[in-house]
Image (cartoon, helix red, strand yellow):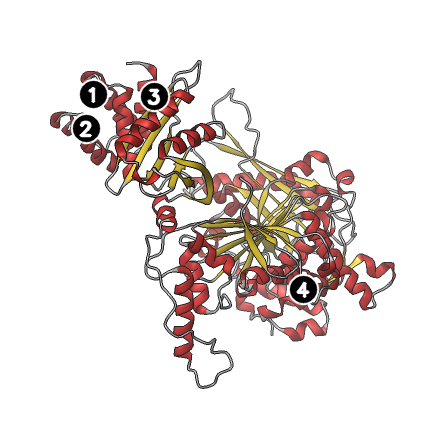
Amino acid sequence: MDDTTKRLVQRLVKRIPAQMLRTTLDKWDRLTGEQKKSMDFTQSKWALTEKMLDLCEVNGLSVKHLTELEMIYIIDNPNKGMWYAFQLMDPQDDAHSVELMQFKEQFKSHLKELVRHVSIKIKKHTDEAVWIRIAWGDTFARPNHLKPTYVVHYLQSPYVFVTSLTLKQKPLLSQALVLSTRYQAIKDANLSGRKLTAIRDLLMRKYQQVFPTKYPSPLPENNPTISSIETFFVLLQMACEAFGGGMLPQLQSAVYKLETKFRDNSNKTMSEREEPFKCVVKFASTNLLESFRHCASSGIASTPVTPLLSCIPLKGRNYFVITDNGPGPSSQMRQPQN
Amino acid sequence: MFKSVSGFCLLGPSPQDMERHHNSATRTPLNNVGVQRRSKSYRLSYRSCLGTAASRLGLTPALTARRLNTSRRALKPHGVAEKVDPEQLALLVKTEWQLSYVTPLHQFRHTQLKSYSRRLAAFIAAGKQQGLAVAVENPQTTFRVSFSLVEGMTESADDAETVLIQIHARPSFAGQDEPQRPAWSGWLTCVNGNPDYLRSLPKDFTCLPLFGSSGAEGLGALVKSWFQQSFDCCFGPLEVSHTSLQWLMALWTNCHTEASIQHLKMIWTLPAVPPLEVTYTVNPEDAWELWRSVRKQKENRGGGGEEEENCIDIEEVADFVQGLKSHFYRHFRLDLSAGSLNQVSTALGSAKHSGRMKISNSRYMTTTLTLLTESALLKMPI
């Protein structure tokens, strides 16, 4: 057994939690029933590794098969590592009719043209997602299977999610994606997070959206006839309109780079200053959107909810650079340079 | 208004410690009740030394702002770097310390440090024998304790000299090199403590109210226990109050022209469900400009003279923080006052509400420690 295969086995057994290893091996279907029974998942990882190495030797399994195992595990457990969202831009006429086989062939051939040694595995998953595993090599080196990039593309949508991609690899991947999907460009969607499912649901709006009610609700501020229950419902309605109803995608952070002028009536010196007040604000929570929704419905946030926050679900992004736009006092969103 | 006497030492030793107190070889003559009685009659309360105004305020936490000094001298880079032994200084900076307050030590002698080293080592060995948890991998390990004097930390003649304690784990295998980092280290200090209070203490008492600890917690607990038994004192957790955190923000930002703070970072928590953490990092130049504008406003309001220039008032600190909050509110319509400030940090140091503190630049150590000494003295029961 060569060194790469060994290291890959070691890495996989180390990485996959014992209880998941059993199910993943089942799905992999490369070990016989007997062999699977012989594995004791209560043993130490070291012992399991030795066992796996034996079995792979016996069955004549190679890197090719092990990468399958890895892919099965990652697809079932996508909420690890950092995922970044990208959006394909300016579809050509035939972009919408690209179907799976065509995409697979095209992607492989384009990437292979760009990178001398590369190993590509493409698999379609149940929910219209196409998963791609890329092990990168170059003119001199064989593909490195220990640091693969994973890409998820939803056919019929312009969205692509990527993890473990270096700066050097980015333009190569971008090129291959653009050509094989028949779009003209790809840009950073300014959305990232540890949970693929969360950022996907946010970007593709797979959560319950709440639309404004028929009659616009006035803010019940100085109206003595409006009860606190009504206030509660008004705030709750506003909060849900801004962030969504029901279960919200588990986004964990949002970053705002503020480059706006300081304006405060009580501080004349600062308000007259020409330069922007530069700061960075990062919001973090186990479920950021729920936290924001709660802030809005409970009064911690003043309503109406500021567009800076409601932009997260509206535009499906969590990285913003905010600058002053024009002479007015309000800040607007501007997209960062790609 | 004062806490009842029965509350005095109950905060310090846990029931476990009390037991050890009776069993330990290094016995101190009195049980707790005796200590309280003697201390009560011999020591004035810290608060009574602050003057009648302070004592009328009582123990309400909300009035903390008025209990700390409302103005303090601006941070000047005291020549601590020149006065303190550089090796010792290196041990103090760039480490995160867990803070506690300590009540005055009875019959503590700076001349007896060698003897204390031996006694503490024996105490730890005895503690290990009794099976008390000390986080060490090898049960054969013995500990070497060293107490050292850190001179030059303070300018005031009333302050007792700082004491540094280190515990090195000596592995039992012969020939192994001594480990570089101590298993535990800590210090006791008093920097610019209130002179009226310090002078009011009877001669037998040494006041080193601020205690910092870093390393194996089990060892730290043993050290505190030993001090409690040997010098009839009490330890208690010292949080860095919101007011102190805001002071540090202002004091550190004030240094920006002399030593770049690199950033002013604050971590707030808002009480949402689930809780929302906000990390608000301000560019150093912008933080400095805001601070300067607040200072200028004070000048315009009629503060004059050089004496005033060196003094920073709490109103200025409050205005500074309010400025930061209002900029935030303008964008996010979230009022940071609804939440709590948990941590502040700059290149000069960091401090957490939970009582953890790190000094990254020794030049500004003195004012930070002055602030914390004051907090410790205020937090002490009675």
Q: Nearer the viewer, residue A287 or A35?
A: A287
What residue sits right under mark 3 in the picture?
A7
What residue sits right under mark 1 in the picture?
A55
Q: Amino acid at mark 1?
A: Leu
* Subunit of label 3: A
Which image quarter: residue B337?
bottom right
Q: Residue at x 38, y 28 (%)?
A: A148
Is there one chain holding both mark 4 and mark 3? yes
What residue sits right under mark 2 in the picture?
A39
Which image quarter: residue A314?
bottom left
Q: Secondary structure at mark 1?
A: helix
Q: Amino acid at mark 2?
A: Met
Q: Nearer the viewer, residue B172 or B111?
A: B172
Crowding at mark 1 (Cα within 10 Å: few <14, some 14-19, many 20+): some
Sequence-wise, the earlier of marks 1 and 4 is 1
What residue sits right under mark 4 in the picture?
A264
